[in-house]
Image (tube, rainbow, N blue to C red):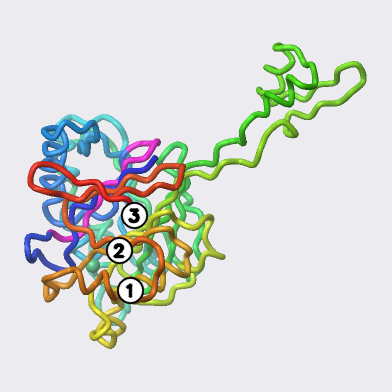
Amino acid sequence: MFELHVLGTSSARFAHGRSVSGSVLNTPGGLALIDCGEGMQKRMMDHNRALKSSGLENRTRISRIRAIFLTHGHLDHTWGLLPLLQTLDLDGRRNDMVVMGPTTREAIEWATQHPGETPPEETGISPTDLAILFSQWQSIGTKDEASSYSIDWVLIPIDDDTPFKSPIQPLEGVTVTIVPTHHGVPSCGYHFETNRKQGRFDRERALELGLTEAQIGQLAEGKDLTIDGQDFSAASFRGEPRPGCSIMVSGDTAHGPIGFNADHLPSSPQLLLHEATFLADKQEKATQYYHSTAADAARHATTCKASALALTHYSSRIDHLSPLVSEAREHFSGGVAATLDGDWFGIDANGDVVHHVRVENGWNKKNL
Ligand SMILES: [Zn+2]
């Protein structure tokens, strides 16, 4: 089961009551953040309080964060990180934290040689490349004395367009795949999948064969048996492995990375949370600034064979969201939702995706 709490749906700046990027993913292996724009810790606390007061058991406590996945270094996706890390230190956190994000090998090399510095223009390395920012953030630290917990800063070099399994897997029972995207700086999306469960054990067949309870127990535990010269393989009593839950978050991207093609992904996501900065009338602008239109987001949802699409990251020029949904529906036949701050999605292994729409005193449920 995954829960994705979307706490910022605006691109670049706060607008129309919408904050900049930041989502909380609740997984069986712990809580993760995907991006951490300005004010993220306060948004998490407010959201947590709202969940509690509406009687729900779901929570977004900052103390529970295991890992923070950044999609790229632009400040509207990262400016809330240091204050959040500092609060955890003030709270006396003990558990390690993983902070990871994409970069290039050249930027890692430059940052290693020039720790804490800003690369001059002729290097071609952006000052907001995460290799540069991580180096600067580590040199600032979160306070003067030693921190109460340690942070594992993980840079993921992106070589080409092909998705690959993350070299660091901080969420137990969940496999994270890096999906390189096309943006102005090294960038990626993330695909999360809970591990597949073994197939159902066929107890009826074992009983029909006259096996004892003890023998059935051994087969169910995966032990092969030989009874009166006859072989029974444990695997033959198991059905097809059951798929896990899966979700994918696009990050910022122009249309077209091959990672949005289902053939390159470990599984088709049940839910794709995708940026839709513009409507198709601004396609040229979207391409120029490496962003997507609602139509682009929907095309990606179709190519990756997602079951449902949730739109986010709207330009401040977009006031009403219904045109985005109508545009997306022209290019994608699954469920489409226009996410607003405080909405969350529940995704279970049966394939259900439920959109919890924020209303004044709680949330309304809507199947996607
Ligand atoms: Zn952005």
Could you say which disc has been placed on residue 368 in the image? 3
Residue type at tag 2: His
As measured in the structure, the alpha-carbon distance from the residue carrying label 1 to the one carrying label 3 is 29 Å
Q: Residue at x 89, y 23 (%)?
A: 230
Residue type at tag 3: Leu
Q: Residue at x 35, y 58 (%)?
A: 249
Q: Horizontal and vertical percent for residue 198?
A: 60, 35
- Evaluate if marks 2 and 1 touch, with contact meaning CB atoms under 8 Å apart: yes
What residue range appears in magenta?
19-30
Q: Residue at x 38, y 75 (%)?
A: 331
- Evaluate if marks 1 and 3 touch, with contact meaning CB atoms under 8 Å apart: no
Between circles 1 and 3, the one closer to the viewer is: 3
Quadrant containing the C terminus is bottom left
Q: Is residue 199 magenta?
A: no
* In the displayed structure image, the side of residue 229 where residue 356 appears, left or right: left
Residue type at tag 1: His
Between circles 3 and 2, the one closer to the viewer is: 3
Query: Which of the two discs, 3 and 2, labels the residue nearer the N terminus?
Result: 2
Q: Is label 1 in a helix, a strand or a loop?
A: loop
Q: Horizontal and vertical percent for residue 183?
A: 33, 74
Q: Is residue 26 magenta?
A: yes
Q: Horizontal and vertical percent for residue 201?
A: 65, 29
* In the displayed structure image, the side of residue 107 where residue 94 appears, left or right: left
Residue of label 2: 72
